[in-house]
Image (tube, rainbow, N blue to C red):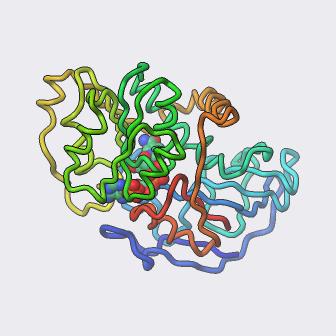
Amino acid sequence: IKQILLAARPKGLPVASNFETVDAILPELQEDEVMVKPLYFSVDPYMRGRMNDAKSYIPPFQVGEPIESTGVAEVTNSKSALFKAGDKVMGNPFLPWATAAIFPAAHLRKIDDSIPLTYYLGVLGVPGLTAYFGLADIGKPQAGETVVVSGAAGAVGIAVGQIAKIMGCRAVGIAGGAEKVKMLTDTFGFDAAIDYKGNTNMDAAIAAACPNGVDIYFDNVGGDISDAVIKHLNFFARVPLCGQIALYNSTEVPVGPRIQPIMVTRSILMQGFTIGNYSSRFGEGFKQLSEWVKAGKIKYTETVEEGFDRLPTALLGLFSGRNSGKMVVKV
Ligand code: NDP
């Protein structure tokens, strides 16, 4: 089998030499173990943080060990009564970057393959749940309010905008490139979308897209984009801090405007979260998102990189906006 290891910790933006593909041999399958062949891997921005040796909510990848991410796999061989060949499964929670792997049965959970398998990595998986709980629980949207989301054309952002619309809000997306902003308004029902790459005056663009100011800012990117949005927050605005992808490759502590005076004088709530905080409510989130998807109220799109070897390229592509919607790798 093939495995992809973390070869060296990156400084700044990761490069190809941070990864190494190696051949490996699997041991013999033991009682209560299951052998799987991954079909799709997810690549996600938070994985950049796991490449650093830093304290976080999740342990770092180890140099010389396989990288891991969420993924969907097929059982190829089973010595567990719980699984049979052909079953579709997910890791609990991760799969190593390998063309095959062996797990104790307890490490796997079966999934229903009447749903497209990549949905478990996107709209019905972590990104969808993140959009739902971050917006509903921290954003607390009220009909008629204006919701701005950055990273809007990505896996989380596309869901945030559509859920905002379901909740009766005005949805404004910020994304990179003319094609992405057109997709947001024309395909995904956003009321307005701003191309930050083609824009020298974000301040004016936000003012024009949000004539009543911003009640909820769902922040996926941080940096200059967030600095521009924060000036337009209304009294009692809520800011779910979901991600800061613009800063993940920073080599120094990023500095920006001191926003606390705005927060104080406008009584703004800003709250960071990780989706693990909501693990006891995943069932509720999955059910709600599934209903919306089935009813056509949430549409889905993805960028599929083909081939196991493309995993590093796909991961790095998140930092240059290679993807529209969820980025996945088909093994
Ligand atoms: P996306 O599908 O949104 O992919 C990343 C996107 O980020 C790219 O397509 C790109 O879009 C944009 N981007 C990359 N670099 C920059 C930059 N310097 N400035 C602005 N935009 C940039 O990823 P996800 O939807 O999976 O994740 C979105 C955010 O949510 C990330 O910050 C992630 O860490 C966070 N997250 C947080 C979770 C939590 O539990 N809190 C769970 C899941 C995700 P463009 O072309 O528009 O620039």
122 left or right of 77 in image: left
Q: Position of residue 113 (x, y in %)?
A: 79, 47
Location of residue 330 with respect to 205 vertically, above or below: below
- The image quadrant that residue 209 belongs to is top left
**Residue drawn at point x = 65 percent, y = 36 percent:** 296
The foreground one among 324 and 271 is: 324
The count of marks equals 0
Viewport quadrant of the N terminus: bottom right
Location of residue 137 with respect to 100 vertically, above or below: above
21 left or right of 230 in image: right
Q: Position of residue 234 (x, y in %)?
A: 24, 25
The foreground one among 60 and 280 is: 280
**Residue drawn at point x = 46 percent, y = 37 percent:** 161
The foreground one among 321 and 80 is: 321
Location of residue 135 with respect to 319 vertically, above or below: above
**Residue drawn at point x = 20 percent, y = 60 percent:** 252
Viewport quadrant of the C terminus: bottom right
Examine the rendering and report whether any part of residue 58 can be seen: no
Examine the rendering and report whether any part of residue 7 can be seen: yes
Q: Position of residue 305 (x, y in %)?
A: 59, 67
The foreground one among 290 and 54 is: 290
**Residue drawn at point x = 62 percent, y = 41 percent:** 124
Q: Position of residue 278 (x, y in %)?
A: 51, 31
23 left or right of 57 in image: right
Location of residue 265 with respect to 11 vertically, above or below: above
